[in-house]
Structure formats: structure tokens, C-alpha cells
Amino acid sequence: MDAHMVSVTMRPRVIPKRLSARPGTPAAVLALATALLAGCAGPATQPRTDPEPAPETTQEQSLRPIPDVGHLVPKPEPDEADKVVVVKSLRQLRLLADGEVFRTYEVSLGREPKGDKLWEGDGRTPEGHYTLDFKNENSDFYRSIRVSYPNQQDWREARAIGVHPGSNIMIHGLKPEFADIGKGHLRQDWTEGCIAVTNRQIDEIWSLVPVGTPIEIRP
């Protein structure tokens, strides 16, 4: 060898241990595997974490709207009614205070429930605007509250056809011998024109409806 030539020592190529050539493994396959591992061997990336929201300040908490729960608190029931409404078609008697119904009762009506009362003995419950003007503790039908029927219009209509309009229309309970029937009396309309409820119900109505309370009887 020429003395002026530099001696070069050839280093053998180092193949990573885990990718050392197996007998019969092509060099191109090893090169590709090495490149893929180089991409995966980069610095580990920490998972992204969003910063936690800052806690609310005392001022922000104080500005939160207070939920309205007033509608969840039941209103106290009125001590008494200022109006009574009877709806004949629904067989209902309603107690009202300040325009709102606070109690409802099922009722039986006169044996001829349809139509306005015209004369005594027609078996109809009158329709119109009246007053509950008297309470009878010793009624034949366990307590009764009288409806101020007939009014002037009822008299005029009755005289026009030559009849008497009738009287003594009551809200009342049941006779003592039928007191145990209770709501069984609702199976049919059976009065002579009155408005009938159970004895327990007339006790409630008695205590809640003062004399002088207006009553409206609707068809």
C-alpha cells in the first residue's frame, strides 16, 4: 500500500439489538422498521388538560338569582266563602273566595233537573242569582240553608202563565233514616227542586257559608 495513503478503518454498521438481523431478513424490511420506531421514539406528549374554572367569588355567588318557590307553598284555605256557585249540568256545588274555588261538592238536584223552575211542584231546581238568606238547624233534611227563591223575576214569569212559582228551595243534607246512604244519594236526582249533599258535607258548607252569601245557580 502507498505510504501516503491514510489507513481507514471500516466500522461495522450497528443494528439496534431488538432489530438485529435474523437469518434471511431482507435489509429493506429492517430499514423500514427502524424508521417507524424512530417516529414512535420521540418525546412523550402529555395529555391535554384544560384549566379548571376559577371558583366563584363571593360577589358572583351573591348575584345568583334566588329561585322562586312561592308557587310550591300551598295557600291557606279561606275561613269562609264569599260566593256559592251551583253548576246543574255538572252536579257540582262550589265554594269561592276572591273569585277562586276552594271546595267542590257533588250534589243531587230536583227530580226534573233540566230547565229553570217555573211553578210549584214542577220538580225543577231554579236557575239564576239569589242569596242564601236563612239557616235552619232543625230541618227535616238534616240542616238546610235557604235560597232566596222566588225573586221578582220568578214572580213575574209565574204570574204571566197563571201559576205560583213555589218556594223553600234549600241546600240540605239527608233525612236521619237515610243518613247512612252517604254519597249513594247521587245515583239519581230525587229532590223537589232543592240541592242535596251528604250530612258531613252540609256540616262543612254550614260552617263556611255565612247567611247573606250570594249564590248563582247555572244550567
Image (cartoon, helix red, strand yellow):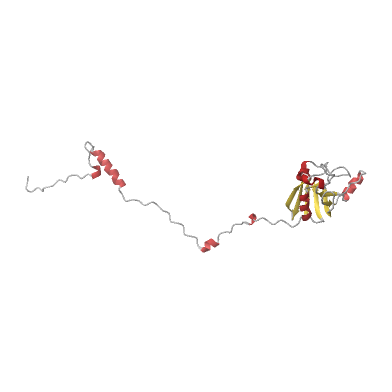
Q: Position of residue 73 (x, y in %)?
A: 65, 56
Q: How many marks?
A: 0
Pick the residue in front: 155 or 42. 155
Q: Is residue 166 left or right of residue 93?
A: right
Relative to 102, say whether 18 is above or below: above
Task: Let me know if residue 16 appears in the view.
Answer: no
Q: Residue furthest top?
A: 24
Relative to 20, say whether 61 is above or below: below
Residue ID at (29%, 45%): 37
**Quadrant of residue 211 in the image?**
bottom right
Q: Position of residue 62 (x, y in %)?
A: 55, 62
Task: Let me know if residue 33 appears in the view.
Answer: yes
Pick the residue in front: 5 or 86. 86
**Quadrant of residue 18 in the image?**
top left
Q: Residue furthest bottom?
A: 59
Q: Residue furthest right?
A: 162
Q: Quadrant of the N terminus?
A: top left
Pick the residue in front: 113 or 135. 135
Q: Position of residue 64 (x, y in %)?
A: 55, 59
Q: Quadrant of the C terminus?
A: top right
Pick the residue in front: 154 or 92. 92
Q: Is residue 67 left or right of residue 197?
A: left
Q: Position of residue 187 (x, y in %)?
A: 77, 41
Residue ID at (28%, 46%): 38
Relative to 34, say whether 133 is above or below: below
